[in-house]
Amino acid sequence: MVKAGTGCFLVGWGWLVGKTKKRYFLLGKRYLCRSIKVCMKTDKNTVIGFVLLGILMFLYFWYTSQQQNAIIEMKKREEDSLSKVAAARMKLVDTVALKTDSLKRDSAVRVAVAGNFTDAAVGQEQETAIENELVKVNFTNKGGQIKSVVLKNYKDANNQLVVLSNNSSISYAINTAPAQSATIDNLYFTPGALTKNADGSQTLRYTLSAANGQSITHEFSLQPNSYKIGWKLGMNGAAQLLTNNALNLNWTVATQQMERTSQYERQVSNICFSEDNEFDYISSNTDHTFEKPAQWVAVVQQFFNSTLIADNSFNSGSIKWARATDSSRNLATATSTLQMKVPAAASISVPFHFYVGPNEYEILAKQAPEMDKIVNLGRDMYSFVRPINKYIIMNVFDFFASFVKNYGWVILLLTLFIRLVTAPLTYSSYLSGAKMKALRPELDILKKKMG
């Protein structure tokens, strides 16, 4: 019994223990699988988290580096700007110093070559104005010459009064001492008082005196209602002041834009002259040498001109015309070198005139012979139309303008007049055209039948 019961107990216990072990084994296995799954999920999320964290850190460092680079670049620009400002200041100081030194050297050179005119080598520039109803002429004592001319009745494209001769100069060389010479534009004249004469004209006199009694005078005069400026050059001691009794004038004029389109204004600008009392001109970049006496030289723009007139003619000389090629307001530069023989006398007086004004035919015709041809009524291959324009078209235009103040209507009337005058000449062509127009339908029918 005992043995049998004991055996049954042992068998039952063994079964229970085996069952329990199997249950725990299954529970452990299930837990282990869940743990592995959790671990797998945890590892995947961790990897994703680390990747995202890495991306965020990369973006942060990249953004920070960009900001630092921008700050460094800004500081560099600031340093460069400060360096440029400092360099500009140093350059300005150097430029001022150089300019001062240059002025000192120029003054020293002028004094060195001034000879008997040493007192006139250094001075202060002073301007004096003469004006009438048409112009205001500004003069300067440096060189005793015209500084600028303001035309009171004309305005440029910017609605400002037209200013001419503001970029021009006239000069000549004189012997200031044995083996020494100077140009007159570097010497300072003594301006005299402005004189108003009984005929309404005004006179301004500049004087240049030497220690040995030699003197030079530039006397300018302006008549009422005139664009013509008189210039009388006087010399006391001319035999010593001029070499071989020859006066060598250098006249330079730089023209500037007046109208809205500089290209066309530059194209129509030219230099005109009278050589042996015959008109001629040059409009391209070229030179011209006078082989015969020249009476006047004119620098012509689209609507205005500046002209130097010699009352006694220039014996020889040359002119150079150079058009500007850039897009600036400069149109062209005319350089004239003009020679004149003067009397072999102790004192001489040489008369000249300047005309600075509009290109109006009737006004120019009164200034000097051939100056009316500055107005282009027909040149070169179109010269045959000049008599027609001069004696017919211009007179008809003036007739219409005498009672019609609006030039637009004047041009319209002139156009109608020209059409009426030329109608007989074009009548036959009009008639032929009308006949051809009337026959065209019949011709078209014949073409269809034949073709």
Image (spheres, helix red, strand yellow):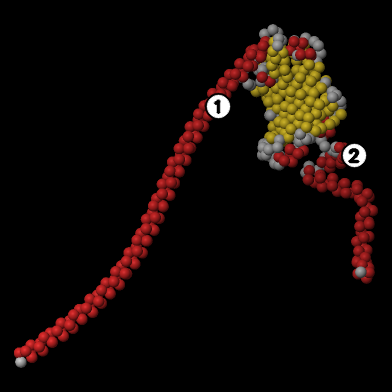
Image quarter hosting the N terminus:
bottom left
Which residue lies most toward the left here?
2
In the rendering, at what x and y percent does residue 344 appear? 81, 11
Q: Which residue is mark 2?
A: 384
Relative side of 193 to 448, left or right? left
- Dots 1, 2 in contact, CB < 8 A: no
Q: Nearer the viewer, mark 1 or mark 2?
A: 1
- Toward the viewer: 125 or 247? 247
- Toward the viewer: 59 or 360? 59
Residue at 70% across, 15% down: 181
* Secondary element type, mark 1: helix
Query: What amino acid is labelled 2 in the image?
Result: Phe
* Secondary element type, mark 2: helix
Residue at 78% across, 27% down: 319
Q: Which numbered disc covers residue 95?
A: 1
In the rendering, at what x and y percent does residue 272 appear? 80, 31
Residue at 67% across, 39% down: 327
Packing grade of label 2 (10 A; few <14, some 14-19, many >=20) is: few
In the displayed structure, 249 sits above or below 76; it is above
Packing grade of label 1 (10 A; few <14, some 14-19, many >=20) is: some
In the rendering, at what x and y percent does residue 124 appear? 61, 19
- Toward the viewer: 149 or 16? 16
Image quarter hosting the C terminus:
bottom right
Q: Earlier in the sequence, mark 1 or mark 2?
A: 1
Relative side of 134 to 401, left or right? left
Q: CA distance from mark 1 to mark 2?
A: 59 Å
Relative side of 423 to 165, left or right? right
Query: What amino acid is labelled 1 in the image?
Result: Thr
In the rendering, at what x and y percent does residue 363 appear? 81, 32
Q: Toward which corner of the image does residue 165 lie, by quadrant? A: top right
Residue at 70% across, 41% down: 260
